[in-house]
Amino acid sequence: MLRRVMRGVRAAVLALAGGVVPLAPALAETRPVVVELFTSQGCSSCPPADAFFATLADREDVIALGLHVDYWDYIGWKDVFGSPQFTKRQKAYARHAGRRSIYTPQMIVHGREDVVGTHPVDVAELIMRYRDTPATVTLDIARGPAGEVTIEAQAAAGAQAPLNVHLVRYEPSARIDVLRGENAGRTLVYNNIVTEWTTLTEWDPREPLNLTAAAPGDDPVVVLIQQKGPGPIEAAARLR
């Protein structure tokens, strides 16, 4: 099973890198696609998805966010990155889509599509689809001299209202020795581990957005503008 998944990973990487479908570099820089991976150190099905996710983590055309949930903790290993906040976000996605259950590994692509995290070809196809979707919101972010982030956005006429503005921080990588649970005895590597998720404000897109938010430290900063629900992501930007 793992061998088939990794063959799929290699195929998806080739597709995203231009081996199957050529990239449009300028578009990729200005229209990154957000991929959220819901995963857990206590889930034996997750490591192949985590490995595929690692191939997305450094891409310029993808903002990959690893969200560790806490509902696997009961079987003997507490995920050191797990958070009930991320479980709540995954449940909210499910409710918004009319689903009754959640699972790991699950990927949500640009707030619009869910796919099993061990189906890399499906993920690659969705990334290419949403990368080429015209943006309804333009978003610019920059670091200020005191560690703050300035956020400016403007929406096209008729944009969905209101929109949530999120500030996300992540740890680029970590290696964890799992001592108990389904992955006991394994050393697992994780990428783009979300450590902070803050909803800054609700934005009425009929007016331009000008906002400053504190973002101390060296960890990357991501700003997402997303329909409530959570629903589709209208714009995303990152500072590494």
Image (tube, rainbow, N blue to C red):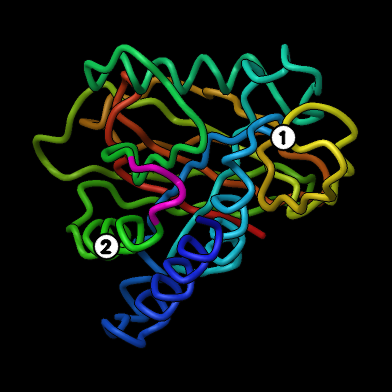
Q: Does the stretch in magenta take in 3?
A: no
Q: Which mark is residue 125?
A: 2
Q: Main secondary structure of the magenta part?
A: loop
Going from N to C along the chain, the mark reached first, 1 or 2, is: 1
The x and y percentages for residue 64 are: 53, 52
Secondary structure at badge 1 equals loop
Q: Please count the marks in the image.
A: 2
How far across and how far down the image is residue 218, in percent? 81, 51
Q: Which residue is mark 1?
A: 41
Viewer-nearest residue: 22 or 201: 22
Residue range highlighted in magenta: 115-119
Q: Which residue is pictured at 45% across the width and 40% down the height?
A: 224
In the foreground, 130 or 137: 130
What kind of residue is marked 1?
A: Gln
Residue 165, quarter of the rendered image: top left
In the visual, does 40 lie left or right of 140? Answer: right
Is the residue 101 above or below the residue 129 in the image?
A: above
| Residue shown at the point (64%, 32%) measured from the top left | 43
**What amino acid is found at the position of numbered circle 2 in the picture?**
Glu
- In the rendered image, residue 75, in percent from the top left (x then y), is placed at 73, 16
Q: Position of residue 20 (x, y in %)?
A: 29, 84
Which quadrant: the C terminus?
Answer: bottom right
Which of the two discs, 1 and 2, sits closer to the camera? 1
Q: Residue at x 24, y 22 (%)?
A: 97
Residue 133 is left or right of residue 139, and the answer is left
Q: Is residue 164 above or below residue 125?
A: above
